[in-house]
Amino acid sequence: MDNVSNIPTPKQKKGNTFRHRLGVFFEDIYKIHLFIVRFFKEAFRPPFEFKELVRQCYEVGVRSFTLISVTGFIVGFIFTKQSRPSLATFGANSWLPSLVSIAIMRALAPLVTALIASGKVGSSIGAELGSMRVTEQIDAMEVSGTNPFKFLVCTRVLATTLTIPILATYTAFIGLLGGYLNVSLNEGISYTAFVQQFFQPLMFLDFTASLIKSVVFGFTIGIVGCYQGYYSNKGTEGVGKAANGAVVTAMFLVFIEEIIIVQITGNFR
Amino acid sequence: MEKAKANIDYNNTVISIRGIEKSFEDYAVLRGIDLDLYQGENLVVLGRSGSGKSVLIKLISGLLKPDKGTIEVLGQDVCCLTDRQLRELRIRIGFSFQNSALYDSMTVRKNLEFPLVRNRTKITRKEIDTAVETVLDAVGLSQTINQMPAELSGGQRKRIGIARTLILNPEIMLYDEPTAGLDPITCIEINALINEVQQRYHTSSIIITHDLTCAKETGDRIAMLIEGQFQRIGTFNEVFDTNDKRIKPFFDYNFIH
C-alpha cells in the first residue's frame, strides 16, 4: 500500500519538473506585471478612495511605529558602538558621527524600515486580502458594484508608498538619537556638535536617494502583499501562503532594489 | 409552509442563457445549457455538489466568463459589457453568498451601508439610516445593527447577507446555497424569507441548492442540473415524477430517509 501511495501521480510529477516550475515562475512574473499595470491604470482615475487611503496610511504607520522606534534606536546605538574600535585604531573617533550619519541615511534607515514593514505590513496585507478572497468578500464587493481592486489594492499600495518614506525618515531620526546616546556616554560630545557633525558629510543626493529608495521599497511591499493576497486560493492554506509569500518576496525584492539603486546613485557622486 | 402564489410575467424574460459552456482545465462543468428566468419567478437549480450550480450564478453575475454561449441579464449580454457597464448591471442584481461573505472588519451597519454609499453618491445620512433600518427590519434583525459579523450565528449572517443585497433594491436575486449548514428551523425561516423577498421586493430569483425542502418551499420552477446539463425543468412534481436513476435518489434521500 505504501509503495502504491508513494508513486507520484501525473499531476505531482508535472508539478515537480524543472520545466513546469520555470513555466510557473514566468507566468507569475507576467501576472505581477499585469497587476502593476492595472494599479497604475486604476489608482489615478476617479472616483478616488481618499477616506480608505487615509485609513490605510494610519494603519501602516501605527502597525510599524513601535517596532521601528525600538529597532531604529538600537541600530543607531549598536552601529556607533561597533564602529568605535575600528575608528579608534586610526585615532579617528571624532569621525564617528559622520560615519553613523552616512550609514544611517544612505543605507540603514530605508533598509531597516523596509524590512520591518515587509514583516509587519506586507504579511498583514497578504493575510487580510487572502482571507477576504477565500471567504468571498472580494467577490461580494465586486457584485455589489464596487471595484475591489481600487478599494483594496490601490489604497494599500498608495498607503505603503506614501507612509514608508515617512517611517524611514523617522527611523533615521531615532537612529541619530541612538547614535548620539552612545557617543555622549563615551565621548561626552554635546547634542549640537553631534548633529552638526552628523549632517556635515551628507549631500542633497543622500537625502534624495534615501527618499527614492523608500518610495520604491514602499511600493514593492504594497504591491507584493496585495498580489499575494488578491490572488490567494486553496482555502486557509492559501491565506498562510499569501502572508508568507508577501514577506519573503518583498524582502528579497527590497535587497535586489537596494543593490540597483545604490549602483545607479553611485554614478552621480 | 405553503408558498404564496407568485406574480410571474411569462412574457418578460429577465435572464436568458443560451448554449453556455464552461470548463476548468480539462474538466467540463457546464456543457451547453439553456435557461430562462421570468419576471417575478423563483427558479431553483438543483444538483449534486460540484455539478456547476455555483459556477452558473457566478457566470450570470459576471464573476466568471463562459467559454462559449451567451448570457443576457435584463436585456444586456454580460459577456460583452465593459467593466463600468458590468458594475452598473450588478447594482440591479443581488448576490447572496453561501458563506454570507460579510466584511469581517465592519459592523452590521457598515456592511449594509457599504454598497449604498458607494453606489448612491448623492444620498443623505438620514436616507442611509432609513434604508439600513428598513432592510434590517425586513430580515428581522434590527437588534444586531452594531454587532460584528463574528458575533452573529450562521442563520443571522445569512439574513444580514440577504439584507445587504436588498439595500440596493435589486431586480434579480441570486442565492447560493441559502440553507447550507443551517439547522432545520433556521432553514424554514430562510425559506420563508426568500419567499417574502419575492413578494415584497418583486424580485426574480435563482436559488442554488441541493436541499429539496428549500426547493419545494421556494421554487416556482425547478431545474435539475446533472452532468453539466439541465436534465429536467418544470414544477417540483413534474421534475420528480420520474424513474431516472440520476434524479430519483435526490427525492428518496430527502423525503424518505
Image: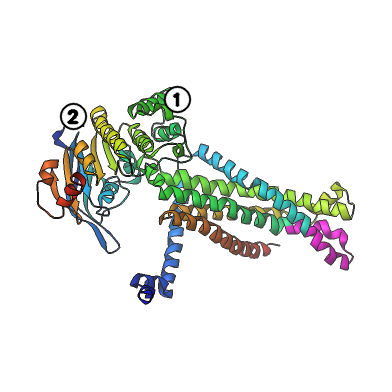
- Determine which quarter of the picture holds residue B68: bottom left
Percent coordinates x, y for residue B3 in the rendering: 19, 32
Percent coordinates x, y for residue A163 in the rendering: 60, 46
Amino acid bearing label 2: Ala
Q: Tell which subunit mark 2 falls on.
A: B
* Nearer-N-terminus badge (2/1): 2
Q: Is residue B38 magenta?
A: no
Left or right, residue A163 beside residue A236:
right
- What residue lies at 54% left-to-right and 53% top-to-bottom? A123
Amino acid bearing label 1: Arg
Q: Is residue B174 above or below residue A14?
A: above
| Magenta stretch, residue numbers | A79-103
Percent coordinates x, y for residue B130 in the rendering: 39, 23
Q: Tell which subunit mark 1 falls on.
A: B
Q: Is residue A98 magenta?
A: yes
For numbered disc 2, what is the local secondary structure? loop
Percent coordinates x, y for residue B250 in the rendering: 19, 49
Q: Residue under circle 2?
A: B4
Q: Residue under circle 1?
A: B125
Kindly indicate whether the residue at mark 1 contacts the one at mark 2 (C-beta within 8 angstroms): no
Image quadrant where one finds the C terminus of chain A: bottom right
Q: Hey, which residue is sitting farthest bottom in the picture?
A: A3
Image quadrant where one finds the N terminus of chain A: bottom left
